[in-house]
């Protein structure tokens, strides 16, 4: 993390009945960072966000903002903003009245409020919308109003809980770019919750992957995508193949072996997955071409081809029955049901670690 931390989540635990939604979570978020919590439904990401906001209390642990313990403070004393999936705009107000609501409650001068509202509407690409009824806006426009309102008091920290999930794909992609631009322009620290892998990769400086209340991996998007640490992380990102095998010792080395190939594991894998497994991205699998130096090569049966527009998926069956999927933008024309030669660069085979418990 390049910048100094603004937010600390320290050993936070939260349980609802028998379900643990935060299992000793430790996080640091840098000042001015776009930080995303990513995971499936039930992973605990929204609960952790609500504890940061003060809408839920942790069973144990501490939450610090700018070095101050805010664990027991109510939301309005934490100097943060929050944006929800539902826009939560006031339907009886105009755009300007919605954006300026928090400023008017602070008894700021009318001209000060007007200037700040105008500035924010320009920032969210809604200039000239001041007098429009908020109910007459599109979903994307309403969400931009909600973001402008949350930013109006200049919070140190903006929390966003799945704010784009209700939008259609085209508007959602546009909003992803706009949100990142807004975050850069304001320098506000964003903590963002989503279940969408592509959304997280597109916008984030760093991503925390959660599963059943456990923090599984925190990394920059490229590192998280290319070098997952566990089976869960590898399987969560589309296009990654998890191949199981066994671990054997060869002299002083650990070697991963399945029926199709074997590969030596680096010393850094002190706790391998159980059963031992490796991950290979689909786009790193080459078919029908000879293996080169530094490649591992094996044979597989082509079971199915699926055309997906810019690329095609090739489902392959290994000798032990495991399936993997190769992806290619201009793959060879191969016969279904026949064996094909497969090659993968050795450095693209990623050993997987044990899951956190």
Image: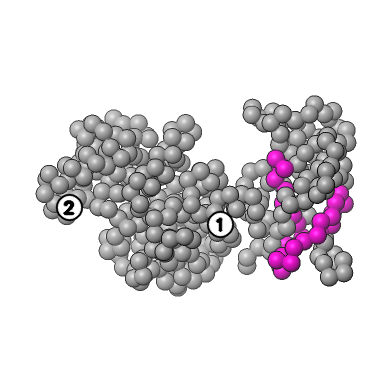
- Residue 92 lies in quadrant: top left
- Across and down, in percent, residue 1 comes to 49, 61
For the residues marked 1 and 2, what is the alpha-carbon distance in whole angstroms?
39 Å
For image coordinates 69% across by 28% down, the residue present is 307
Q: Secondary structure at mark 1?
A: strand
Which one is in front, 32 or 39? 32
Question: Above or below — where is 57 with respect to 177?
Answer: below
Label for residue 354? none
- Could you tell which of marks 1 and 2 lies nearer the N-terminus? 2
Furthest-front residue in this view: 293
Q: Residues within 10 Å of mark 1 (few under 14, many from 20)?
A: some
- Across and down, in percent, residue 2 comes to 47, 60
User: Residue 259: within the magenta?
Assistant: yes
- Residue where numbered disc 2 is placed: 105
In this picture, residue 101 sits left or right of residue 220 = left
First to last magenta residue range:
256-284
Label for residue 219? 1
In this picture, residue 315 sits left or right of residue 223 = right
- Across and down, in percent, residue 54 comes to 35, 62
- Across and down, in percent, residue 102 comes to 22, 50
User: Residue 35: within the magenta?
Assistant: no
Asked whether residue 56 is in view, the answer is no
Depth check, mark 1 against mark 2: the one in front is 1
Q: How is the image coloured?
A: one colour
Q: Secondary structure at mark 2?
A: helix
For image coordinates 78% across by 33% down, the residue present is 304
């Amino acid at each position: 993390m390049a910048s100094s931390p603004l937010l600390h989540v320290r050993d936070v635990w939260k349980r609802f009945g028998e379900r643990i939604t935060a299992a000793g979570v430790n996080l640091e978020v840098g000042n001015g960072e776009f930080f995303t919590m990513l995971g499936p439904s039930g992973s605990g990401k929204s609960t952790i966000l609500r504890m940061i906001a003060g809408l839920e209390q942790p069973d144990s642990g501490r939450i610090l903002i700018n070095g101050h313990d805010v664990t027991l403070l109510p939301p309005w004393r934490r100097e943060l903003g929050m944006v929800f999936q539902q826009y939560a705009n006031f339907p009886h107000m105009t755009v300007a009245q919605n954006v300026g609501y928090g400023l008017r409650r602070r008894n700021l001068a009318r001209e000060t409020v007007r200037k700040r509202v105008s500035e924010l509407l320009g920032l969210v690409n809604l200039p000239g919308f001041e007098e429009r009824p908020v109910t007459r806006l599109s979903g994307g426009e309403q969400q931009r109003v909600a973001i402008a309102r949350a930013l109006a008091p200049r919070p140190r920290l903006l929390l966003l809980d799945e704010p784009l999930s209700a939008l259609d794909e085209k508007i959602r992609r546009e909003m992803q770019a706009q949100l990142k631009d807004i975050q850069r322009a304001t320098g506000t620290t964003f903590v963002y919750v989503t279940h969408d892998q592509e959304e997280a990769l597109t916008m984030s400086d760093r991503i925390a992957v959660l599963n059943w209340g456990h923090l599984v991996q925190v990394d920059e998007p490229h590192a998280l995508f290319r070098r997952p640490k566990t089976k869960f992380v590898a399987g969560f990102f589309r296009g990654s193949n998890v191949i199981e095998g066994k671990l054997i010792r060869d002299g002083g080395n650990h070697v991963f072996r399945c029926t199709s190939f074997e590969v030596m594991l680096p010393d850094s894998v002190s706790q391998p997955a159980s059963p031992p497994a490796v991950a290979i991205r689909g786009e790193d699998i080459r078919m029908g071409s000879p293996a080169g130096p530094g490649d591992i090569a094996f044979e597989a049966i082509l079971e199915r081809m699926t055309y997906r527009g810019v690329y095609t998926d090739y489902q392959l069956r290994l000798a032990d029955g495991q399936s993997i999927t190769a992806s290619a933008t201009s793959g060879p024309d191969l016969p279904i049901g026949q064996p094909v030669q497969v090659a993968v660069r050795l450095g693209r085979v990623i050993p997987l670690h044990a899951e956190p418990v």
